[in-house]
Image (tube, rainbow, N blue to C red):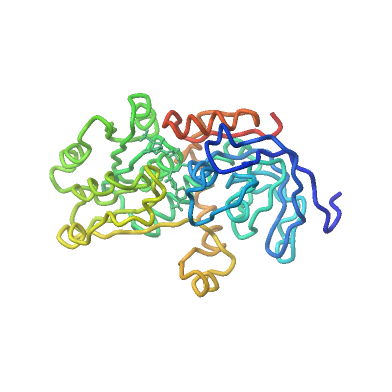
Amino acid sequence: MTTVGATVKARAWVATSLGDPTAVMERRDVDVAYPGPNQIRVAVDAFCLNLNDIDIIRGRYLTLPLEPPFVPGMESVGTVEAAGPGAEHLLGQRVVGIPSLAHGGYASYALVDAATAMELPSWLSDTDAAAIHYPFHLGWLALNERARLQPGETLLVHAAAGGTGSGALQMGKAMGARVIATAGSDEKLDYCRSLGADLAVNYRTEDFVAAAMDFTYGHGVDVAFDAVGGDVTVETFKCMGFNGRHLIAGWSQDIQLEDAHYLTPRAMAYGNFSLCGVCLVYVSDPLGVRRTLGFNWPGRSEGQQAHRRILEMVRTGQLRPAVTRELTFDAIPAALEDMEQRRTMGRLVVRVGS
Ligand SMILES: NC(=O)c1ccc[n+]([C@@H]2O[C@H](COP(=O)([O-])OP(=O)(O)OC[C@H]3O[C@@H](n4cnc5c(N)ncnc54)[C@H](OP(=O)(O)O)[C@@H]3O)[C@@H](O)[C@H]2O)c1
């Protein structure tokens, strides 16, 4: 029985200073506060690792700079054991959600923004549930809302063996597109094919622009899902088709590119294609965010609609949670190192009880 207002002790990984996760992370017990307005506290069963966790631990994620010590981790699956004002309807529900300010997830209890908490059906295991949020919700927002991908169009997905990439690849196939996947090793290319890629190209050793132009008979691709950034983005512009939509979805290559000046308008203007930004954060008050931060973030109701569609696609086998490794809690720093060194595929799920 949870006492209203009481903190709980959680086992956690803590970033004790900014730097290499294998050097600065420590196992500690931490206090997790009672949830505030529109917040829930989740007794966590599982969560996924994200590349941006590394950026946060290294102190280069300028959107949310954090002072150590802090608990990293931006996804949680578990049961809501306490709810703040406005979030009482979620009490007792099993949910996947985003911890407040995108950290606090590497722990047995986490404070989660209620606007992001999506209820989970009993047929979905904790492991699979931990793998769906960023890949499939971002894939849906990017390809459906932003790029308006149509059946029969050609979609290029970069880093398609990764977490968000594998989600975009599968979402593209589920929406009826022909998908060109890029990735950085033979094993990753095989993985992309197993997820349905029509063409898989090693963009570290092959000319992916030539491959895409060849695959589209010289027309170029209709949509590109690009969470790599930098020179990969600039190269991708060379294979965008007429009326194409290039999705700026992230900067795996270097998060600091988000504020860099490396794009020029000429390619878009002369190429007759569009740049589409995409940012997945469901919020309770989109207009308030618009007023205070100047950003356009989708509301909870849009998230719930997307969630229903995604669960249906998972249930019917059109989307497969891309879990490639289940990790013990102790294994997190080593797994982050693998991720940073580009040795991982799909999603790495941590089981908290293990
Ligand atoms: N827009 C949004 O709302 C949103 C939400 C969530 C995540 N994201 C973005 O999605 C991207 C992927 O995140 P993730 O957690 O799913 O990671 P991930 O894709 O599992 O891992 C990143 C992959 O990027 C590729 N990569 C290219 N250059 C790299 C470099 N210099 N260092 C490391 N990896 C590099 C690697 O694949 P190859 O070896 O195949 O090149 C690597 O496996 C990130 O940029 C993140 O910011 C965006």
Q: Residue at x 74, y 50 (%)?
A: 32
The one of 1 and 104 positioned closer to us in this rendering: 104
Quadrant of residue 84 in the image?
bottom right
Compared to residue 258, the image places residue 339 above or below, namely: above
The one of 51 and 153 positioned closer to us in this rendering: 51
Looking at the image, residue 225 sits to the left or right of residue 299; the answer is left
Q: Position of residue 273 (x, y in %)?
A: 22, 59
Say whether residue 315 is visible. no
Looking at the image, the residue that sits furthest to the left is 218
Quarter of the picture holding the C terminus: top right
Quarter of the rendered image showing ligand 1:
top left
Q: Position of residue 81 (x, y in %)?
A: 77, 50
The one of 116 and 129 positioned closer to us in this rendering: 116
Q: Position of residue 241 (x, y in %)?
A: 19, 52
Q: How many marks?
A: 0
Looking at the image, residue 194 sits to the left or right of residue 11; the answer is left
